[in-house]
Structures are given as structure tokens and as C-alpha cells.
Amino acid sequence: MFSSDVIWTAEFASQKWLYDLTPYMNAKKADYIAAPIETATYDGKIWGAPESSDAAFIYYRTDKVKSLPATWQALYADAKTNGGIVYQGAPYEGLTCDFLELAFAAGGTVLSEDGTKATIDSPENVKALELMMSTIKDGAAPKAVTTYMEPESLTAYQTGKYTYMRNWPYAYALNEKTSKLKGKFAVAPFPTFEGGGKAGILGGHNSVISAYSKNPGAALKLIEFIGSPEIQTAYAAKFSLTPVKASVYDDPAVKKALPFSDQLKQAISQAKARPVSPVYPQISQAIYKNVNEALAGRTDAASAMKNAQSQIEKALASF
């Protein structure tokens, strides 16, 4: 049994490296928040049990903003005149997440439902990218954001200059230790994309069983133990790992350790899995490279999505 990053499911399952846990998970589904199960699902089967999850927040300054704007469009408009926003715009996995949070909320997709065709070149995705590009063009985000990963975004936010930041829950405790931010910020799940809905991108890990295990029954017992309320509570309270079972969020120990637990539960519930495909690394690379090109002003949104479409089609054809 091992802990598998959520993006590995399709690659490992397609190589027949994992036990099919569909019967077990079908009996346990009601215990879990539904969204993380998506990350363990491939080809109509469930290959793992959610172990821990993750979904990003919008961090905002409570001394500058009373409550988070209701839409991405309104948030960026406010950022333009009220202190700005920082996020992850460098060409790496983090940018794939940042872009898909907007694209999925806008109604866009990356792959067809069966995972065999590229669908990224769509009006919805172009619209999402154009909105993201507008943050830099209009001055809501610094031009340097095209080089930022999580640490650079956090460092910029902790200067006290910016009103908004997109980042993962880990940044909460670090902000609390920063004199310029302590007691002056809050977090919220992502807002609605105007004309679309709400989304987010799931991180985390799933417990899976190797197809080569000599004792899969004992491995399943371990998975059962890891998924128990007691261990899920300990993961959250002692190690700040995001629970995958809704009931755990109500535990006093969890609420004390994660004061943003209500917002986190909502963020996880509205989030979606990244494209579940055996060639996900190539898909992600096609996304973040082309989105970064557009953010940096070297291409337009429509061309970026066309290029991504072509590169993802090649990746799918290679499998």
C-alpha cells in the first residue's frame, strides 16, 4: 500500500500497477466528500481511497476588504484599484492549477468525458485566460507574477503591499506569524466566474494498493485505518492535512487547529480533479507553457489555447 499523489491515478492504473478498489469505495462513498473521489477515478473504476486533500483559497486583507467580491471579475476589478493581487504565474504545475480554477468555473474542459480527446480550445477557456491576462494588463497584478511560484507569491503578499493572494492553505499559519498580516487577513473559497459557476483544483493524496502486494487484505485494513475519523482528525489537528470526510471538520480539535476549517470544507467540496489521464504530465506542460506565454504578452489567448490543444492531442496520440 502506498500514498499516491492525486495526479498519478490514471498513469498507474493504466499500467495495471494498482488494485481496483471500486467495490470497497462504492460501499464507503457516503463517508467521503464527493469531490476527492474524482481524483481516484479512472476508466470507470475507483483505484484508491482519498487520504488527504487540498484546495486553494483567496487570501484577502480584512483592513482593506470587508468581504470577498462575489465574482472573479469583481475581485480583479477591486484588486486593480485596491492593492492588487498575487498568484502563481510561472510556467510550472502551479500555473496549471491557477488557470484551471478559472477555466473550470467558466465552464471549460480540457479533455472529453472519456479522456480520449482534447477540448481545451474552447470559448470558455479563452475567456478564462483573457480574464487572467487582464490582471497584468490592467495593473491588478505585478508583471513579475509571471515568474512567481508559491514561495514568491507568499513573500510578496507578506510585504503588506497586496490586498489579495491566491495560495494553498499552508500559507495561513505563515501569514499569522507575519507582523504586517497577523489579524489583518482572512481566507475564502474561490468566487463565481461571471456567467459560469464555482470551481477549484484538488491536491492531496490517495491510499492505493500495489497490484504486486502479497497481502492486499492487510493493505486494505491499513487503508481503512487511515480513513478512520480518529486518524483523519489526527492528520488535521497535528499535521494540518486536509480531511476527506465531512464529519471530521466538526471535531473541536480540527476547528482549533484549522480555524479556517469551514472555508476549507467548502473549497474542497466545490473543487475538481485535474485532468485524469495517463499522459497528465504532458497535458499540464501544454497548459502551463502556453498560459505563461499569454500572461507574459508573447501571444494572445486564442492562440495559446490552439497551441495547447495541438500539444495535448499529440500527447494523447502517443499513449
Image (cartoon, rainbow, N blue to C red):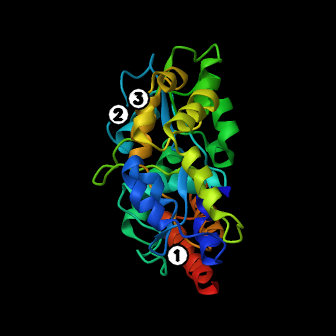
Q: Nearer the viewer, residue 118 or 265?
A: 265
Cα separation between marks 3 and 1: 43 Å
Examine the rendered structure and indicate whether residue 185 appears above or below residue 285: above
Examine the rendered structure and indicate whether residue 103 appears above or below residue 166: below
- Give the mark nearer the N terminus: 1 vs 2: 2
Q: Which mark is residue 309?
A: 1
Percent x, y of residue 63: 45, 16
Residue lying farthest to the bottom in this orientation: 317
For numbered disc 2, what is the local secondary structure?
A: loop
CB contact under 8 Å: marks 3 and 2? no
Q: Is 317 left, or right, of 120 in this rendering?
A: right
CB contact under 8 Å: marks 3 and 1? no
Residue at image coords 43%, 63%? 125
Q: Label 2: which residue?
A: 69
Q: Is 190 left, or right, of 144 in this rendering?
A: left
Percent x, y of residue 177: 65, 17
* Image quadrant where one finds the N terminus: bottom right
Examine the rendered structure and indicate whether residue 218 appears above or below residue 57: below
Cα separation between marks 3 and 2: 27 Å
For numbered disc 3, what is the local secondary structure?
A: helix
Residue at image coords 47%, 73%? 111
Name which residue type carries label 3: Asp
Q: Label 3: which residue?
A: 250
